[in-house]
Image (tube, helix red, strand yellow):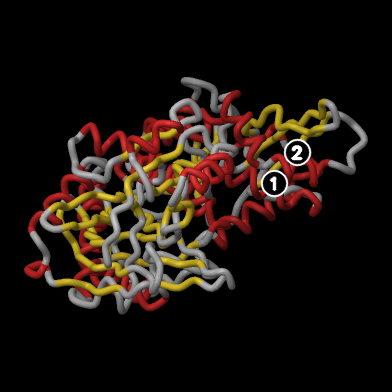
């Protein structure tokens, strides 16, 4: 992807960066040459990003032209929002206190140049703020009230706001950013760039190493250049055309921030932020299944005022789920009123709402993988030995798993696939894994998961390479459709 640096007046620009074309904001906005160029990475270093200023329009029109602006309009708006500032300040409160504790004053300004500050001791704080507010140059103001530091405001700064003694450092960091932002070989000439977000240290990832290798091979066959990224690579998102998240997702997690930013930057992303939001909350799913009349276990949304209704409504044994439970974690069974009371007392301390469901014992759960509103694969997930879940974290801390058996479509009861499609289609057209229980001829949806497990040797036992090639073909189609609109 070609890169240009947009400033108000190139003749007055005092921070030259090697091998990067510098153009005026007016030229970028009005010259047909820039309108016609495709795939530009636009570094917006105008003096102001205020509403309807030249700097604002550079980032706004870059999106309309299919370019990648840095900063994006979303970042510009986020920096103006007091509510977002409060949330961000809370999220990184521990890091703020740790970084600023030695200071004697009650106010502090931090200059951040491409994710770095001149003082090494502020590296982590600078890096985190740069991830949360991706903009070339930032200035954050902190205030201490009652011995607690908080982020008071953060804003982009232009070159005129950079002290002269900082020039060499800023130039060095800019050169570092542009020279390291692409770390993969460019010997081949693929049509598009795909990032795969993963965590090499994750104990139970949604795709094992061999599956990631198969995804990469399939992606390259359809025309993607592939790069693996991790949680520290947030700043590189705008350089890609698509993002595939192969790390366990959660709303209060960097995976959601990656998804949200990728969507805001115009990337095709699986899982998209709306799917993560919907699938990660069991209260939402309970309402969704009920409203769409999709068969599911008898369910009660629990709060402190209706907990006494559970025994007569659901009965025992019953299943209690935390709203953000996943992969058998945060899911509990109560066999009696005494067990239930103890469990609810603990869980209500961290969540105002819980989910209670009837217990439906089965030897296995069906899992139907769904993509683009069509069934992609079907598996049987058997319960772990001597346990009522597919995962059993025993007293020694060792995780035991039930067997996984992939199934040909013609061996699966049509009602299972039909019910799974109804459930997944109520969420969207992305990649989902729908868990169902079958008792006799009756099928019930247990959960709808974004970010479903696709592991080599398990979910791909029957379809082999077809799973990987189908997903990558979907990415290609979506990118092509998006590019055709720009």
- Name the residue at 24% across, 43% down: 428
Residue at screen point 50% across, 22% down: 53
Quarter that holds the N terminus: bottom left
Among numbered discs 2 and 1, the one appearing first in the sequence? 2
Q: Give the SS element for disc 1.
A: helix
Rendering coords of residue 6 (x, y %): 51, 39
Marks 2 & 1, CB-CB < 8 Å contact: yes
The image quadrant that residue 396 belongs to is bottom right
What secondary structure is marked by label 2? strand
Camera-side residue: 93 or 356? 356
Neighbours of disc 2 within 10 Å: few (<14), some (14-19), many (20+): some
Residue 214 appears in the figure: yes
Classify 370 as above or below 7.
below
Q: Mark 1 sits on what residue?
A: 126
Circle number at residue 110 = 2
Between 176 and 97, the residue placed more toward the observer is 97
Q: Is residue 416 left or right of residue 1?
A: left
Considering every residue shown, the one lying at the far top of the view is 52
> Where residue 176 sits in the image (x, y, percent)?
63, 58
């Amino acid at each position: 992807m070609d890169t240009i640096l947009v400033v108000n007046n190139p003749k007055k620009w005092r921070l030259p960066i090697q091998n990067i074309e510098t153009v005026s904001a007016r030229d970028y906005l009005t010259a047909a040459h820039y309108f016609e160029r495709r795939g530009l990475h636009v570094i917006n270093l105008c003096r102001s990003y205020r509403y309807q200023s030249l700097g604002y329009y550079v980032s706004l029109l870059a999106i309309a032209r299919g370019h990648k602006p840095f900063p994006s309009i979303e970042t510009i708006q986020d920096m103006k929002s007091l509510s977002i500032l409060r949330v961000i300040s809370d999220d990184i409160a521990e890091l703020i206190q740790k970084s600023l504790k030695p200071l004697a004053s009650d106010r502090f300004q931090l200059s951040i140049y491409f994710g770095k500050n001149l003082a090494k001791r502020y590296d982590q704080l600078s890096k985190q703020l740069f991830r949360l507010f991706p903009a070339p140059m930032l200035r954050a103001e902190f205030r201490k009230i009652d011995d607690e530091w908080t982020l008071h405001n953060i804003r982009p700064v232009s070159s005129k706001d950079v002290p002269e003694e900082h020039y060499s450092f800023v130039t060095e960091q800019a050169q570092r950013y542009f020279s390291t932002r692409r770390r993969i070989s460019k010997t081949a000439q693929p049509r598009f760039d795909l990032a795969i977000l993963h965590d090499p240290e994750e104990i139970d990832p949604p795709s094992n190493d061999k599956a990631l290798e198969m995804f990469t091979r399939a992606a390259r066959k359809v025309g993607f250049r592939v790069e693996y990224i991790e949680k520290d690579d947030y700043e590189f998102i705008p350089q890609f055309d698509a993002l595939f998240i192969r790390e366990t997702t959660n709303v209060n997690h960097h995976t959601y921030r990656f998804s949200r930013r990728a969507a805001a930057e115009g990337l095709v992303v699986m899982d998209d932020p709306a799917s993560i939001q919907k699938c990660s909350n069991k209260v939402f799913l309970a309402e969704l299944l009920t409203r769409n009349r999709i068969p599911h276990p008898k369910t009660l949304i629990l709060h402190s005022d209706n907990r006494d209704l559970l025994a007569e409504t659901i009965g025992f044994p019953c299943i209690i789920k935390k709203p953000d439970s996943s992969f058998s974690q945060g899911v509990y069974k109560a066999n009696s009123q005494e067990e239930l009371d103890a469990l609810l007392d603990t869980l209500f301390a961290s969540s105002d709402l819980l989910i209670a469901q009837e217990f439906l014992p089965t030897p296995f759960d069906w899992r139907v993988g769904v993509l683009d509103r069509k069934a992609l694969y079907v598996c049987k997930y058997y319960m772990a030995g001597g346990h009522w879940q597919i995962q059993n974290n025993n007293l020694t801390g060792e995780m035991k798993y039930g067997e996984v058996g992939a199934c040909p479509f013609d061996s699966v009861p049509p009602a299972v696939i039909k019910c799974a499609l109804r459930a997944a289609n109520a969420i969207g057209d992305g990649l989902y894994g729908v868990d169902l229980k079958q008792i006799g001829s009756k099928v019930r949806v247990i959960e709808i998961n974004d970010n479903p497990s696709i592991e080599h040797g398990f979910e791909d036992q029957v379809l082999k390479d077809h799973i990987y090639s189908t997903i990558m073909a979907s990415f290609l189609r979506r990118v092509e459709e998006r590019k055709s609109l720009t």
